Amino acid sequence: MLEKEYKAADNHGRPSEVSPLSGKTARLRPVSFAHPSEEDFAKLLDFYCIEWLYEPRSFPLRWEGKKIVEMFTPDFYLPELDLYVELTTLKQNLLTEKNRKLRLLRQLYPEVNIKLLTKNDFIKLLAKYGYGPLSEVKVEGIERVLYSHAKIQRRVRTLARRISHDYAGQRLVLVGILKGVVCFMSDLMQHLSIPVNVDFMAISYYGGDGQIVKITKDLDSSITAQHVLMVEDTVDTGMTLNYVLGHLSAHNPASLRVCTLLDKRARRLIDVPLHYIGFEVPDEFVVGYGLDYKGEYRNLPFIGVLRPELVQRGASS
Ligand code: IMP
Ligand code: MG
């Protein structure tokens, strides 16, 4: 492979030199892309927080004796999808040549997952993984993506493993507060390896500043003498959780713990005990993966920060 200069962007945007083949999670960012469409593709992947490597590997395709006489270097590798991507235009001569190389590559390296994509194809591919065409999923309101779908899934699996381990040999009642928790509850419960019951409550906020909590739907079954895990999407000021925990403990459960996907610690007004935390988030309004702003954005498969100019505080559930 041709020697290139690479920089890896870490989470804080400070570039550092890395070798092209090292660093499993670093985003390898070339100083310049060979083609503008590659840069577009990289920007789209960055927006969705999908990890990518630029030309990390070359595949020898033809040899004369021991000498490699033909190689193919796909443009991108997406580790989370275990997928190589070669971008292409519809120019027939280029397409024929690339198709020939791809056929050879697939014969020689059958375990390698590679796709030849035009710009339209890559938008369709993103849609297949839940990152649908931009206009359809209202991403115009999103300032930036905080957690990709893949990252959320990994974190949820880790939490589920810890919970299954901690409650081994016991039955657990999961209690969620509608509606923000639906995606998290659904994914979390599927990864628990202990027997569980699931129940939901719904609440609304009233009073001048919206800080008085009222239960609009109570539990369907008794939790007395049961091990209860309260599952929340976000703990912000802590008022909601504090109120609901008071309500639940009045029913004398055998134990009562809290699992929250997001902990917005910077805004805490009431100290509430959190036993399992997905991510600690900055003091910004986030949406997606069940979280809404005025009833919208719940269906985004990722969690993103809403553009601050769109936010009036206290408008979600
Ligand atoms: P708290 O009572 O202030 O802790 O608020 C918790 C509730 O507010 C959560 O259950 C969420 O439904 C909602 N909430 C807090 N922050 C956000 C956010 O950034 N996006 C969406 N909903 C939020
Ligand atoms: Mg809520």
Image: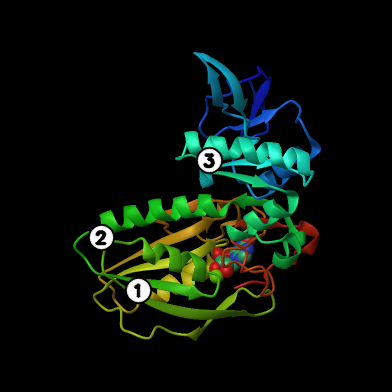
Q: Give, as a three-letter code, the residue at label 3.
A: Pro
Q: Residue furthest top?
A: 66
- Ligand 1 shows up in which quadrant of the image? bottom right
* Residue that carries the numbered disc 2 in the rendered image: 167
Foreground: 24 or 210? Answer: 24
Q: Judge: label 3 CB < 8 Å from ligand 1.
A: no
Snapshot quadrant of residue 166: bottom left
Q: Name the N-terminal-most of marks 3 and 2.
A: 3
With 217 as the anchor, is 2 left or right in this view? right
Residue 11 visible here = no
- Within 10 Å of disc 1 (Cα), the crowding (few <14, some 14-19, many 20+) is some
The amino acid type, in three-letter code, at marker 1 is: Ser
N-term mark: 1 or 2: 2
In the depicted structure, whether residue 308 falls above or below residue 228? above
From the viewer's perspective, is residue 266 above or below residue 250? above
Residue 73: image location, x then y, percent: 62, 30
Residue displayed at 73% across by 54% down: 120
**What is the secondary structure assignment of the residue under circle 3?**
helix
Q: Which mark is residue 249?
A: 1
Give the labeled residue for mark 3: 79
In the picture provided, is 276 more to the left or to the right than 197? right
